[in-house]
Each structure stands twice: as C-alpha cells, then as structure tokens.
Image (cartoon, coloured by chain):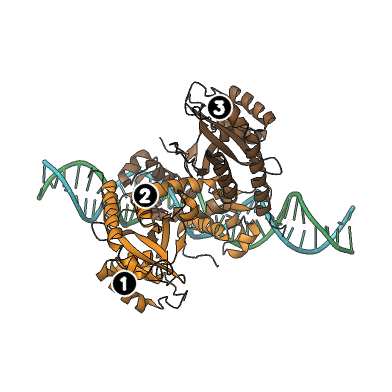
Chain colours: A orange, B brown, C green, D cyan
Amino acid sequence: MASEGHSDGTVGKALDVLEMVAGHGKPVRFSELLEHSSYPKATLYRLLQTLTKQHMLQQDPDTGAFMLGVRLVRLAHSAWSQSSLAPLARPYIDALSRETGETIHLAQLDRGHVLYVDKRNAVRAIEMFAQAGKVGPAYCTGVGKAMLAFLDEPALAEALKEQTYYQHTPHTLKNEAELRAELERIRERGYAFDREEHEPGIICCAVPILSRGGRPLGAMSLTTSTNRSTLEQLEARAGMLLEAAGKIATHAESWRFPERV
Amino acid sequence: MASEGHSDGTVGKALDVLEMVAGHGKPVRFSELLEHSSYPKATLYRLLQTLTKQHMLQQDPDTGAFMLGVRLVRLAHSAWSQSSLAPLARPYIDALSRETGETIHLAQLDRGHVLYVDKRNAVRAIEMFAQAGKVGPAYCTGVGKAMLAFLDEPALAEALKEQTYYQHTPHTLKNEAELRAELERIRERGYAFDREEHEPGIICCAVPILSRGGRPLGAMSLTTSTNRSTLEQLEARAGMLLEAAGKIATHAESWRFPERV
DNA sequence: GACGAAGTTTCACATAATGGAACAGACCGG
DNA sequence: CCGGTCTGTTCCATTATGTGAAACTTCGTC
C-alpha cells in the first residue's frame, strides 16, 4: 500500500497522488492520505490543491474528502475511443457474442497487466465503464498469455517483471519458467487457453490481435465454464476467433495510418 | 481551438497537453501538436516525454504519433465507480428503463457542462449522440437545466459564465435572462423539460438528484421523441422520476458518509 | 550528397516546487 | 472559559526543476 517512489518530476508526483486517491476507492481525507504517502504535509497539500483546481480531483463540499474528478471520465472517453481497439472491434465482438452465445472479452496490455477494454456477455449491452477499465493479471488469463506470447524479448522481460505468481487455483502457473514454456506452446499454436488458471470452473480460448509487424495490439477471448463446455469444444471455435482478430487488426492498421501524410 | 493558457504550474501544462491530444481524436505527431500549442519546442517535447513515461500517453511504435494512454482508462474506471452516481443509480435506472420503455440518461455537472455518466437505451434504439463520458451543453438540455436550477447563486454564476447560447433549434433559450427565468420555474415545479431545445423532435423530462443540503449531485432524464409522446404524457411520469431520484440521493449520502469515523 | 523537415539534446538561467515550522479553527473534556 | 489535540492552511528562505533559444542529429527526398 506504500506509495511508489520512482516518480520523475512534478507531474509524476501529481499522478502518484491521483493514483493514491483512486486506489482508496472511497472519498479520502487529507490526513488519511498524508499517512499513506511519503510526501511532506505542505507538498501533498499543494498537489491536492492543484489537482482539484484542475478538476482531476473533486472535493466533497461537506466533508472536504477527495475523490477522483469528472474530468477523468471525460478524458477517458477520448482515450477509450481513440486509443483502444474497442470501438473498432465492436461489430466483430457483437457478431461473435451473437453467434456463440458466450462471453467475449477484449483486452489490451498495460504495464504487464491485462486491461479489459470491452466485454460482451450473453445478455447485457453497452456498459462501457462498468466493465471496461478493469485490470487483471496477465500470467493466468487467456488474453494475458495470448499477448505475452507475442511480445519481443525486451518487452516480454519487462512485462514478466510485473507478474506476481499468486496461486489462484491448482492449475495456476507457478513461476516464470512455467509461464515461458506455456508461452512457447501458445506461439506455435497461435492461440491460448485458460484451463481454470484464474477462477475454478472458468475456461477460455484467447487469440492475440497482431499488427502487421507482429506486435500484439490486444487480445480477445471466448469465455465459458466447465459445466457448459470443454476445452475441445472451445478449440473448435478458435478459427472463428482468429478470423475476427485478423479483421480487427486490419481495421486497426488502416485507421492508424489513414494516409502516409 | 487554440489551447488554454490559464495553466498554473507544471502539472497544469501537462494536463493542457493531455487535453490537446484528447481533442485531436486521432494519433497526432509532435510537429502537429507544436503548431497548435503555445509552448516552445523543447518544453512541449519534455512534457510529452514525461506523460508518455507515465503511461498517460502512448506513442505509436511505428509512427511515433501520440495518443491517450491506457492508464487513463484505468483511472477513469475508478473515477466512474467512486465519484459518479452511476453505480449507485444503476438499479433504479434499469427499473425506470424497463417500466417506461424509454431512454434514461444520468448526468452530472462538470464546469458548467453536462457530463453523461450513464445511459439506458430504449428497446427501440433512437440514435442519439449521448454516451457515458460524453459532454453536452447545460442551458439547452433537461438534465442541464435541472441541475443549474438548484445551484446556489455563486455556483450558478460560475456555471452560467461557461454557457454559449448557440441556437440549436427555434426553441433554444437565447440568453442568460431567458435561462434564469426558466430556472426559476423549474425550481418551483421541481423538475425540468426539454421542449426540443437541443434537437428537433426530442423532448424530455428531467429531475435533479439533490443532496440533503439541497445541492444537485446529478440529474436524471426520461427522453423520447415528439412522435412517440407528448410533454403532458412525460409530465405524468415525473412523480416516478422524482421518487427514484430521492432514493438515489439517499443511497449516495449514506455511501459517502458510512460512519462519521 | 545537399537540402529541408521532424525529432532530440544541451546548458545557462529563472521560475516554480519544496518542506520545516508556525498558524488558524474546530472540537472536545474539564 | 480555558488548555489540549487533531485537522487543515499559509509562510518563506532554499534549492531543485523546469525553461527555451539554439545547436545538433536523423531521415527521407530530390
């Protein structure tokens, strides 16, 4: 829970503070933040002031407690629609969800962790922030492994440093060696499985979304439970997933380079 | 489109740059940003570097163009779930949407503008511009006016400064005087209407969500079109909306002050 | 291989952040 | 009514940080 110390410059510290407030999950008072932070009183105070004036934080007018500001939601809307695969991938994900009747996840990699940018379950429709924006581990999820498998060595090394191998279930991979072996198999096969590695009874098949250069832009998974389906049945649908992933990748590329200027 | 100049301190400038990238809507190159900004080359460069290192921006590895980073999406998820009414209001909004079969919007006020934090579509999808995270004008929308009406004078004055009275339709209010008169009526009545003031053919009935102290926490609207319903029919449902708003407010209060520590 | 455009680095300088310490309220209980 | 303490706010000399004109390095183009 201790604050990160590797901040460079003033904006680093400011973001540190933002993250601290975000981590708390509830409106939090100055004194409470002060305890958990390593910054001196006056410094923390000024940072909070600045962030509040900038509407990145807002202060409860009654208690003076700090919480994340609405400006973030606005910025994130831009972020989501401009730098995530979600808007592009939406039609394909909708189609997959319809055809299979199962849950589809769309994720991207964020500093070694899985960030879900969209989700379609059998019933619910557009619920962007409720589902999207959540983070999860990479080493024990289908989408995570699918992306890790296609990173180049420097990027992979950096991502692996961020993993902590908590044993969620008996099937969870235990260390970097096991994970690297698994990634090798995924690379050969072209897609990944989650064999109840994160939650008991939950399995999935995940495919990477690769740029022309082979870099993973994201990943997509079809998730189900052991009492509804088997790995073999999931694997039968891998082709469909790979096909959709290819189309999304093509779209993404052509959107990013509209014309070579 | 010129950049804001009223930045205080370094983090102000950094956020300015963030906003600039967000406003562009597409991956944008350094030189292009340089043109549109008032910062000197080296300064802009360093700011971009810092933001990128902090994952608030990301750089397309192929073109070097900047786009908003995924960290924002993560932060916004926290913001949405901790400082917006949306998660609390969800069950009520779901219920209203089900019972009425019409579109329900949930919005909050952000610097004089309406920020939509949730939306529930009608069964029959009327295509409309609002979606969670989007912003809209306050002076010509139901939710906007419902919130403005219950601000105290200092806050209202500040919010009104942010309005620019663009004549969207023949029914749009034309200036602050007209708006203030309308707000007076809304205050007496307890809820607001949008009589095709923003989009032709679109009408709504909106209620404020008020804290115990009478401060508007947000607003909620039931939206429909003139060829499906009339203002009178909408008004008949105002009671239902007010009731839901009251429940949401109560929940919000009790969540914010779990116990007085 | 010379030219211009896009991006990166340098460095003397000044602004802007720092943080210890003093200050102001609010809220007790005595 | 007065000390005590717990919270939040302000001061100000010191110094770290950010500044930006200009020089430099790629890289693609003619």
Q: Nearer the viewer, mark 1 or mark 2?
A: 2
Amino acid on which the number 1 mark rests in the picture: Leu
Q: Label 3 lies in what chain?
A: B
> Can residue B54 be spotted in the picture?
no
Q: Nearer the viewer, mark 3 or mark 1?
A: 3
Spot occupied by residue A42 in the image (x, y as percentages of width and height): 61, 56
Q: Which mark is residue A15?
A: none
Q: What quarter of the picture does the N terminus of chain A occupy? A: bottom right
Q: How many marks?
A: 3
How much space separates mark 1 and mark 2, taking CA atoms?
A: 27 Å
Amino acid on which the number 2 mark rests in the picture: Arg
Give the residue number, with chain letter if any, for mark 3: B230
The answer to whether A208 appears left or right of B89 in the picture is left
D17 versus A187 height, above or below: above
Give the residue number, with chain letter if any, for mark 1: A183
Q: Quadrant of residue B58?
A: bottom left
Q: Nearer the viewer, mark 2 or mark 3?
A: 3
